[in-house]
Amino acid sequence: MLVNFRDIQAQSSKESRLKKNLFFRGGQLTDLTAEDKKILTDKFQIGKIYDFRGQEEVTTQPDVSLDGVNYENIDILASATSGNSGSLQDMIINATDIREAMMKTYESIVISESALEGYRTFLLDLLDQKQAVYFHCFAGKDRTGFAAALLLRLSGASDEEIMKDYLKTNSARKEVNQEIINAVKATLTEDQIEGLQIALTVDKNYLLHAREIMNKHFGSFEGYLREGLALEKDYMEYFQALYLNQKA
């Protein structure tokens, strides 16, 4: 089913002027109902899916194939050394020290070679898509949450608005997170269960830490785009010309 699914444009603030129905984020596309498929292909006319998961995740829980929709796997954390790939398995393994593991994961999301290459590929490809896209990882919260933050920042959204979209994941995943806990709790200790509950949610400190790492290594968001992702200095201008509504 569709989990944590939303148009990142659909904010209450007008600070983000992203056009509607172009950038959709969410969790992995497994076990979709016929209605779920229609939402993606008919209602929102998704043209391409970007899957930020690792190879093991993709192999064990492949996305449902959708007619007429292109698919690309970009393994954001392929070169990460944090020991937490963002997969459910790694969440369980790191459950007893999850906050530290998540901080390290967000460092990898910002500065690891695979993340820099992956987000560069993603952002460059968007200049050619000109169609609705769906991007996701396992839960649609960390690798996906950072990608959504990038798009919102490119649109000129404020830090407050970006954080609002990021934290919305906690309410969007509440029910399915409990289902995951119920399915595995018989095999876990109480400390592991508590850690997994934390791992399945987002914390504002994770995204703030990512911003700190970005500023430390690249000086600013613009420096991250130029030095980290090796994008042309006018990338943001091109992006906004394609995807922003004109100011009134």
Image (tube, rainbow, N blue to C red):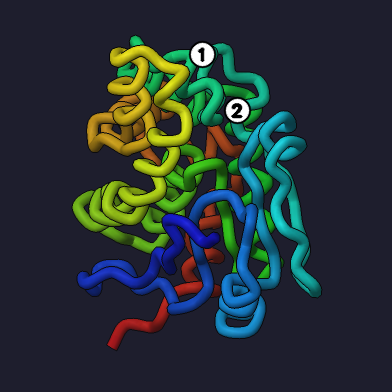
Tell me which amino acid carries mark 2. Leu
| Vertical side of 29 occupied by 96: above or below | above
State the SS at label 2. Answer: loop
Q: Give the residue at x 54% y 32%.
A: 228
Measure the alpha-carbon separation of dots 1 and 2.
Answer: 9 Å
CB under 8 Å between discs 1 and 2:
yes
| Vertical side of 44 occupied by 191: above or below | above
Quarter-of-image position of residue 242: bottom right
Query: Which quarter of the figure is the N terminus placed in?
Result: bottom right
| Vertical side of 71 occupied by 90: above or below | above
Q: Give the residue at x 34% y 22%.
A: 193
Along the line of sight, the residue nearer the viewer: 245 or 34: 34
Quarter-of-image position of residue 180: top left
* Residue 203 percent location from the top left of the image: 26, 35
* Residue 209 percent location from the top left of the image: 30, 27
* Residue 22 percent location from the top left of the image: 53, 73
**Residue 149 numbered mark, or none:** none
**Residue 82 numbered mark, or none:** 1
Decide if residue 131 is in sight here: no
Query: Which quarter of the figure is the C terminus placed in?
Result: bottom left
Find the residue positioned furthest to the bottom. Answer: 248
Q: Give the residue at x 57% y 55%.
A: 135
Decide if residue 181 is in sight here: yes
* Residue 24 percent location from the top left of the image: 50, 64
| Vertical side of 39 occupied by 95: above or below | above
Tell me which amino acid carries mark 1. Ser
Along the line of sight, the residue nearer the viewer: 221 or 232: 221
- Residue placed under numbered mark 2 in the picture: 77
Is residue 50 rendered to the left or right of residue 5? right
| Residue count near mark 2 (Cα–Cα under 10 Å), binned few <14, some 14–19, many ≥20 | many
Earlier along the polypeptide chain: callout 1 or callout 2? 2
